[in-house]
Amino acid sequence: MTSLPQRVIEAAMIVVGAAGLLILIAPNFGRKPKATPDGWQFRVKPTCLLLYVFGFILGAGGVAFASRQLLCLAAPSWPYWVCFGFGAVLTLLVLADWPAPLVLDRQGLVERGSTASLIRWDELKDICEYRMRYDRGVVIHGSGGKQIVVAEMAYDCRALLDRLLERRAVPLRSLEDESAPISIFRGAPPQP
């Protein structure tokens, strides 16, 4: 088995480094909302799509690599079955959760392609901001337990919030309105 030439490895490292840098920096480069005849369409940011494409390539590559090894070997090996299973699960998860543009129109807010997620204007209850480790965004709550999570990494949340609040005034709970973080030590009495 021949090893890869040093130049190929260096070029691959540069490409992977540039893609990683793009993913870190580019969430700030959002697509602007597109006006439609009866509302607005909020497209998915290119960096979010790039992460999904990388996940799909990784999963499909794992399936292809493991399949080749399993077909070529006389006795199947369990690490290749693990690689095959991981790649298959990752590919299916990426395809099942592929992001779609959000549409804000006369009916309400909907994630395109999913009429089950439609929150009509009269069903709209409140909007809550959230912040998790490296992501932030808003959760839009509707009646009947419906909710749409709008991550800042995937969509232009500020523009969506502005357009949504122009159409209908709803309560907006910001992070400052939330209570203090829950602690497992808060309710415990002090020990002497």
Image (spheres, rainbow, N blue to C red):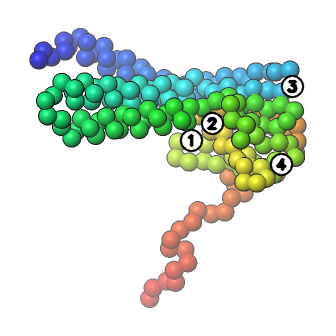
State the SS at label 1. Answer: strand
Q: Earlier in the sequence, mark 2 or mark 1?
A: 1
Q: Distance between the residues labelled 1 and 3?
A: 30 Å
State the SS at label 3. Answer: loop
Q: Distance between the residues labelled 2 and 1?
A: 7 Å
Q: Position of residue 151 (x, y in %)?
A: 62, 39
- Residue at 34 percent across and 38 percent down: it is 85
Position of 44 with respect to 170 (left or right) is: left
Callout 3 environment at 10 Å: few (<14), some (14 to 19), or many (20+)? few
Q: Which amino acid does label 2 sit on?
A: Glu
Which one is nearer the viewer's eye here, 76 or 16? Answer: 76
Residue, far left: 1
Q: Distance between the residues labelled 2 and 3?
A: 24 Å
Of circles 2 and 3, which is in front? 3
In the depicted structure, whether residue 33 falls above or below residue 162:
above
Which one is nearer the viewer's eye here, 160 or 84? Answer: 84
Residue labelled with disc 3 = 38
Q: Earlier in the sequence, mark 1 or mark 3?
A: 3
Q: Where's the C terminus, which quadrant? A: bottom left
Q: Which amino acid does label 3 sit on?
A: Asp
In the depicted structure, whether residue 188 falls above or below residue 93:
below
Which one is nearer the viewer's eye here, 79 or 36? Answer: 79
Q: Which amino acid does label 1 sit on?
A: Asp
Residue labelled with disc 1 = 135
Q: What residue type is labelled 4?
A: Glu
